[in-house]
Image (tube, grey):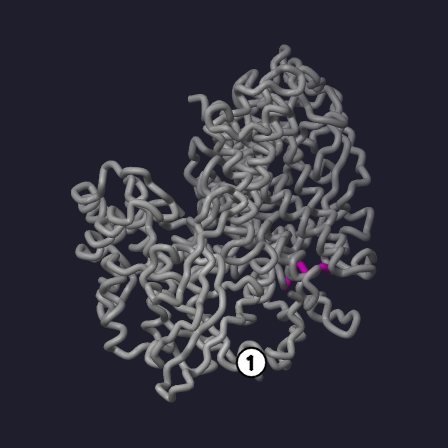
Amino acid sequence: MNFDFSDDQKFLKAQARKFLDAECPPSRVRSVLDDQAKAYDADLWGSVAAQGWLGAAIPEAHGGLGLGHLELCVIAEELGRVAAPIPFASTVYMLAEAVMLAGDEAQKEAILPKIAAGEAIGALATSEGPGVLTPAALKATVSGGKLTGVKIPVTDGDIATLAVVLAKEAGRPGLFLVDLTAGRVTREALSTLDPARDAAKLSFDGAPAQRLGGAGEGFALLEQVLDRAAILIAFEQCGGADRCLEMAKAYALERYAFGRVIASYQAIKHKLADMYVKNELARSNAYYGAWALNTNAPETPVAASAARIAASEAFWFAAKENIQAHGGIGFTWEMDCHLYYRRSRQLGLVAGAPRVWKERLVSHLERRNAA
Amino acid sequence: MDFNDSPEEAAFRAEVRAWLEKNAPKRVESPDPEGGDNLAAARAWQAKKAAAGYAQITWPKAWGGPGGTPIQQVIFNQEEAKYPTPGNPFQIGLGMCVPTVAAFADDETKKRFVGPALRGEEIWCQLFSEPSGGSDVAAARTKAVRAPDGSGDWIISGQKVWTSGAQFSDFGIVVTRTNPDVPKHKGLTMFWVDMHDPGIEVRPIHQMSGGSGFNEVYFTDVRVKDSQRVGAVDDGWRVSLVTLMNERLAVGGASGAGWSEFLEAARTVSGVDGAPAIKDQALREKLADWYVQAEGLKHTRNRTMTALSRGETPGPESSIGKIVSAGVMQDLANSAIEMLDQYGIIDDPELAPLKGAFHTSLMFAPGLRIAGGTDEILKNIIAERVLGLPGDIRVDKDVAFKDLPTGR
């Protein structure tokens, strides 16, 4: 049994933590949160690129480090821990994964080295309005290689250079690569729950679009991309959830009420124990997701669903109960609790709400049990 | 990251498989998880394992074990579970009682008890809980006083409760109050006792679930030698911690009907709109939650096994096992029964789905949430030992035991 990260991967994780503790304290997250004009921390993005993290899982032939997805998982956990205000998920878990999964050689050649070098920012553009997007409701259309339609919200849509867009071509859904710097697209920044991770409304008016993967495979490919992204995001969520538990613990050990530290009351102790239980369940499910992702296992959809459901639940619970453990001070802008409360919602929705993943999971289990 | 054995583990697994194939029973009459009936078969299987060095794999050679590793014990358990072996009534003795006695006893006593227990010839029970204290073990009231004849013997009187296997045990370890004039932790002493003593009476407890897996044990002027004392006089709390450290490992998680059985039942039962209940979105979400929790526990065990496999001390994550599985068991059973609507009240195995497995779980789950550490005690343990939060304030810490308020 070897169901854990290797010593090398744990070393990478320790290095990443050290780096981010120095480079991404809460003040850096706040500098993006508090400044409406600032969509992400470009300096941090540059130093993360210099670490080689953007290309950790990209093959060396395409300019990456060629390490693998397990290494990407440990980096993701550390990014989640500090609530990093950079478009890492959009670029690495979504754009790079989509291109590695479905791109032809020319597309890989053109895009992956740019991602690894920090010269591209990605975005995944699927949603067109409130509610779950279904094939029947999909409106964006590609005709003659030109994309027309509106996508809202698109995380990092205001800063991305390259988007993966879900649209119909000849009535069949497909994924398309759209260069957002080439014109025929209007970007409007949106006010969102987590201003440290911006989003935009993208209106395409005949923007040049290149198909990624087969015609009509849009939703099937999207599911595969989201499976991979969900596992990586689950590690960010685990990192954030663990950080919330640490914050709650530290505060409960220094705050006195009724003559003793509040950490000595069972109401607080049991709350923190509940957080710990959920965090460990999330971590174990995320590990299984990591194994599935790294080995490209047929179990990946089920593993990804379980990882996403457990991690979304754990991070949400830890983020909201962290505020509760802090009491009034936790509700202030100055305390960092809300950075994680916001991020838990951003990460919990960006790859699709847990409710949708629960439905996917049960559908898979039904088929598996019937077989 | 993978689920494979190391080369050494694979070799050990192959050796175990070959031995089991040759020696394990292929069929067992009335298997009983409590190990209560079919004692003869259980003893025979235990003797076979002991002779082959598989009874307590991690026990040192000095105790008659092979001095193996924890991961070897896990591998043996996994492989043994594939056979219909008899129940294991020896585990409480081998896992908790005998190691406690051995840790404090002289070589002669050790030699006297270790071998017969290992071979399944003698069975042990643990006499800790009392009607007045379950979670608060140190509140024990069962008294041990010196015999007035100056022999140095002790006379034990009182009552223990929730004692698994007392009805067929040969020996037990008992926590007694020897000094009521000092705070509770400081006045306890442990003894081993012969369960065949005429002053000991074992009465089965009729559980709310209908079964009787546990007992009350009454001590009426039971005379024991001072040589039966385990550890120093009034040092019984420290001794009992040696026993309790092993208890969390010994009390397993929930078994029985799980998410997979629920899914199968939901295919055939009619839901609110006449479609099969499995199409009910609320039930589907619950099913997903139970699956995620069950998988989380499975892979937490895999993480623990990995630590053992690497020769490391497992992290504290294994402490979440029972608290999660017992809660899921109760919630899942209740939802399964509600899914049946009015029909859910029927627990007749002839009529209820899965021969009433969900009903059995529903009625057993309250016990599982209490046994071996209540949900609340386990949360305290996680908070204090894993997260390092302060212990509860103990108003009884500096008060003589005899002066403690006791309710009734």
Confirm whether the magenta stretch covers residue A39.
no
On the image, numbered disc 1 is attached to which residue?
A: B180
Return the residue nearer the eye: B71 or B350: B350
Q: Chain of mark 1?
A: B
Q: Quadrant of residue B63?
A: bottom left
Residue at the far bottom in the pictured view: B150
Is residue B65 in view from this perspective?
yes
| Residue B142 x, y percent position in the rendering | 50, 71
Is residue A114 in view from this perspective?
no
Which segment did they paint magenta?
A22-26
Q: Residues within 10 Å of mark 1 (few under 14, many from 20)?
A: some
Name the amino acid type tagged 1: Pro
In the image, residue A97 sits, relative to residue A216, either above or below, namely below
| Residue A213 x, y percent position in the rendering | 53, 23
| Residue A185 x, y percent position in the rendering | 75, 27
Compared across the picture, whether A124 is left or right of A34 comes to left
- Local SS, label 1: loop
